[in-house]
């Protein structure tokens, strides 16, 4: 495939900014996407370079663009495809630098994704394999032709994997997700339990299909038995599967846009989204308009850390449940939300209720967390919403449960522990209060406790301890005195001081609850 071939493809809608005939007939050997200021050491000769130009700013001088393009020339890149989205166009200084160094430069419009360019190049390369010398390739020519045809026809992953290893005698082979979900297997491969599959993902006989994917979105080619075949052949098989994976990701990207539109409707301030519009949005996401729904919200650390991929991968384990993963307009960085259709579709599925969903996801969460241990993943799960009209309430529940999950501390530390919290888990006052934002809890504690909130005062600390023990022992003077090794009269005196400083009457149940909540909020 040559650079000029890309310009002929209307689906990409690329624009040539500079390039003479010698540059346009250069052959493309691969594609690298980068936003490094000096990408030279990561490039190979003959590659097409995709850049969103994040490394450049309008205030930068021409020398920065000069260094970037010089690195492309030195590495032997054939062309630069520059995205228009970051700056609303391609800087003229970059075009001039490409002209000086003899690097063709094409602009990529906002509506064309870099993945679409990458897929186009690699699919065209596979389609051209039959017309190239066979020496550089480990797969036989007839196998390459067949796999190229199957890719073009959009065949299912089971068939693609089976045909890819057929010339090896069809050994047992699997394509596994990051958490051990079986995406494809050959007829000779027995079903693999999720736990064993998750362990196999890290085995030495496993090859990553798409190394550029997030830690949660990875696919892996796993051959449990030794196969007498060159490693290069397995890498070529993995690249075929990667092309299928990228096509699936394009569909997933479209689905997330629709899900985001759905979530925007659900989260309307007035909670009065038009039923017809809400029904159409649910239908566009593949969800029934009268399905019981569960909402889940997950939080990572920042945008780009794969939170949406993590949530999508987790929900794929809910057999027979439809779902739509997107992003709320008011979402924090690294936050993703999903609406799950929970109606049971088969007798063996995990649909049918929020409880079953929560159980499945909680069991999976430790495995999901190990795929990127540096990023703690927290999630909140709602109770089922019976109708589309009640989805806003379910969304509110999920976000409240998420706050509760993020407030939980690992035992013996102040660090938050990753995990899921379902609204159904909030069955105690302590659990309920964890869902309230920290600044609100702090404010409540300060106002309810009054002067006692100042625990830098030793006398106040003593009174707070007495109050805590008194409430823990259900207001029993004798048991409180015994626990604190005090005389009962001393306990009476201290509680009277608490009542005076807080303005509460500890003979009243509601005042006891107020102060108990205030202690829990400290």
Image (cartoon, rainbow, N blue to C red):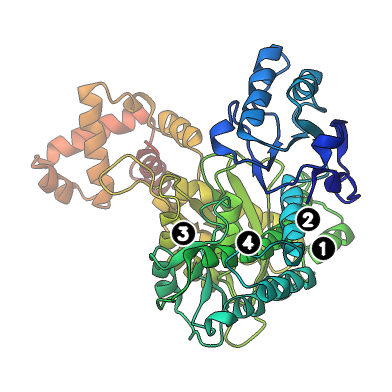
SS for dot 2: helix
Q: Is residue 222 visible?
A: yes
Please name the residue that numbered disc 4 is placed on: 242
Q: Position of residue 350 (x, y in %)?
A: 57, 77
Q: Which mark is residue 284?
A: 1
Give the class, few, some or many, for how many residues have Cα within 10 Å of label 4's Cα (few <14, many ≥20): many
Q: What residue lies at 78% left-to-right and 68% top-to-bottom? A: 152
Q: Which of the two labelled residues, at mark 1 and mark 3, occupies the earlier sequence position? A: 1
SS for dot 4: helix
Give me the C-alpha separation between circle 2 and circle 4: 25 Å
Q: What residue lies at 64% left-to-right and 43% top-to-bottom? A: 32
Please name the residue that numbered disc 2 is placed on: 258
Q: Which of the two labelled residues, at mark 3 and mark 2, occupies the earlier sequence position? A: 2
Tag nearer the camera, 4 or 3: 4
Give the class, few, some or many, for how many residues have Cα within 10 Å of label 2's Cα (few <14, many ≥20): many
Give me the C-alpha separation between circle 1 and circle 2: 7 Å
Q: Position of residue 458 (x, y in %)?
A: 20, 23
Asked if labels 3 and 1 touch by Cβ distance under 8 angstroms, the answer is no
Quadrant of residue 62 within the rendered picture: top right
Q: Which of the two labelled residues, at mark 4 and mark 3, occupies the earlier sequence position? A: 4
Q: Which of the two labelled residues, at mark 1 and mark 4, occupies the earlier sequence position? A: 4
Q: Is residue 255 visible?
A: no
């Amino acid at each position: 495939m040559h650079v000029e071939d890309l310009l002929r493809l209307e689906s990409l809608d690329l624009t040539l900014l500079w390039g003479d005939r010698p540059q346009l007939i250069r052959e493309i050997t691969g594609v690298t996407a980068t936003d490094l200021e000096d990408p030279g050491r990561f490039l190979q000769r003959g590659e097409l370079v995709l850049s969103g130009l994040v490394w450049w700013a309008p205030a930068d001088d021409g020398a920065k663009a000069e260094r970037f393009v010089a690195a492309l020339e030195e590495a032997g890149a054939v062309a630069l495809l520059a995205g228009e989205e970051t700056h609303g166009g391609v800087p003229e200084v970059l075009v001039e630098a490409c002209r000086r160094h003899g690097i063709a430069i094409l602009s990529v419009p906002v509506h064309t994704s870099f993945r679409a360019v990458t897929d186009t190049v690699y699919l065209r390369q596979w389609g051209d394999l039959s017309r190239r010398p066979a020496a550089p390739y480990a797969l036989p020519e007839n196998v390459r032709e067949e796999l190229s045809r199957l890719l073009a026809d959009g065949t299912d992953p089971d068939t693609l994997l089976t045909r890819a290893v057929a010339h090896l005698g069809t050994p047992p082979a699997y394509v596994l997700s990051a958490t051990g979900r079986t995406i494809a297997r050959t007829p000779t491969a027995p079903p693999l339990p999720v736990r064993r599959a998750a362990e196999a993902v890290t085995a030495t006989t496993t090859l990553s299909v798409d190394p550029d994917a997030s830690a949660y979105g990875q696919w892996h080619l796993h051959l449990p038995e030794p196969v007498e075949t060159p490693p290069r052949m397995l890498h070529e098989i993995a690249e075929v599967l990667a092309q299928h994976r990228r096509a699936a990701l394009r569909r997933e990207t479209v689905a997330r846009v629709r899900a985001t539109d759905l979530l925007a409707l659900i989260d309307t301030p007035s909670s009065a989204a038009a039923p017809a519009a809400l029904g159409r949005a649910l239908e566009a996401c593949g969800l029934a308009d009268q399905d019981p729904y569960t909402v889940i919200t997950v939080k990572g650390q920042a945008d780009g850390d794969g939170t949406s991929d993590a949530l999508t991968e987790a929900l794929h384990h809910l057999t027979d449940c439809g779902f739509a993963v997107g992003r709320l307009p008011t979402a924090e960085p690294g936050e993703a939300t999903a609406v799950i259709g929970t109606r049971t579709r088969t007798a063996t599925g995990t649909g049918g209720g929020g409880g079953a969903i929560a159980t499945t996801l909680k069991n999976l969460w430790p495995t999901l967390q190990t795929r990127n241990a540096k990023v703690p993943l927290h999630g909140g799960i709602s109770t089922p919403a019976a109708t589309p009209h009640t989805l806003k309430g379910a969304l509110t529940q999920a976000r409240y449960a998420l706050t509760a999950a993020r407030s939980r501390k690992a035992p013996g530390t102040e660090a938050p522990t990753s995990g899921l919290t379902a609204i159904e888990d909030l069955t105690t006052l302590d659990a309920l209060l964890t869902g309230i934002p920290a600044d609100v809890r702090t404010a409540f504690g300060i106002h309810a406790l009054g002067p006692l909130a100042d625990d830098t005062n030793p006398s106040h600390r003593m009174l707070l301890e007495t109050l805590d023990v008194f409430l823990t022992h259900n207001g029993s003077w004798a048991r409180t005195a015994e626990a604190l090794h005090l005389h009962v009269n001393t306990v009476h005196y201290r509680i009277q001081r608490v009542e005076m400083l807080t303005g509460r009457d500890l003979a009243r149940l509601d005042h006891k609850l107020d102060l108990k909540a205030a202690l829990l909020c400290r």
